[in-house]
Image (spheres, rainbow, N blue to C red):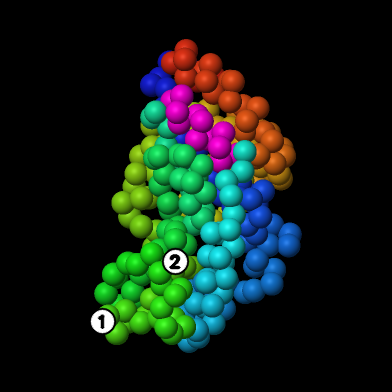
Amino acid sequence: MDRAPSLVVFTGAGISQESGISTFRDPGGLWERFRPEELATPEAFAAKPDVVWRWYRWRFEKVRAAEPNPGHRAIARWQERFPSLLVVTQNVDRLHQRAGSREVVELHGDLWTARCARCGKRVAMERAIELPGEPPACACGGLLRPNVVWFGEMLPQEAFLRADAAAAHCGLFVVVGTSARVYPAAGLIEVAAEGGATVIEVNREETPLSALATRTYRGPAGEILPGLTPEIEAWAKEGRWPSPS
């Protein structure tokens, strides 16, 4: 396939599961214990801001204690070998950045930042959780909330447009650890396939969009992605990706 060799890696909660961070939709995931509308909507925050804040504070502590796993590190290594690589993630844990990835688009925000629900001012979550109040108040009088995208909220437009453009024009689109059920993010897989990219799926289980993949690998990302490194490096050196046919 003769097209510009550009690589996009699209990740979901599955890649961070091996770092000890619970997924939301897999068996045993967080949504089996909590209903989304109780914790991850603007309405929930308006009704019970203290409960929502405490839950996200607990989640932040789990994320802060986690370490990148071999899957995150493999992707970071690809970026060292192939500078144009773009990581697009649904995750809010910033484990990609901590592993060394430089170009990361966060579609669902991040847990390392809090922002005021009124004025939008941002503050590091490490500082926010030490402030008085549950949740703490901003200088403007508004309440601080986690800088994540809740159900019913729009994705950050600039981030999504960048991800959409990259998916439409890439040569290789590697999908890792996503359920492919959460839209509009999951639609990026369809965009890449329709644009003629080779789609590689790495996931423990089949997803609704597995049929779009040229190659599929079943198993933990931390085991599979390091094994793909020699091929990724060879394709980058050759300046072409394998054909999606």
- Pick the residue in front: 195 or 236: 236
Helix, strand or loop at label 2? It is helix
Q: Mark yes or no: residue 171 visible.
A: no
In the image, residue 181 above or below residue 241? below
Q: Mark yes or no: residue 202 visible.
A: yes
Relative image position of residue 119 (x, y in whole percent)? 27, 74
The residues bearing labels 1 and 2 have C-alpha atoms spaced at a distance of 20 Å
Q: Amino acid at mark 2?
A: Glu
Q: Residues within 10 Å of mark 1 (few under 14, many from 20)?
A: few
Residue 62, quarter of picture: bottom right
In the image, residue 199 above or below residue 206? above
Q: Which residues are magenta?
A: 71-82
**Residue drawn at x 49%, y 77% as measured from the top left:** 53
Relative image position of residue 9 (x, y in whole percent)? 50, 37
**Residue drawn at x 44%, y 61% as measured from the top left:** 112
Helix, strand or loop at label 1? It is loop
Q: Is residue 2 left or right of residue 62?
A: left
Q: Is residue 238 left or right of residue 20?
A: left
What residue does disc 1 label? 140
Q: Which mark is residue 215?
A: none
Residue 54, quarter of picture: bottom right
**Most common secondary structure along the magenta stretch:** helix
What residue does disc 2 label? 126
Any magenta on residue 73?
yes
Q: Earlier in the sequence, mark 1 or mark 2?
A: 2
Q: Amino acid at mark 1?
A: Cys
Residue that lies at the very extreme toward the top in this rendered image: 238
**Residue drawn at x 38%, y 29% as measured from the top left:** 84
Relative image position of residue 131 (x, y in whole percent)? 41, 78
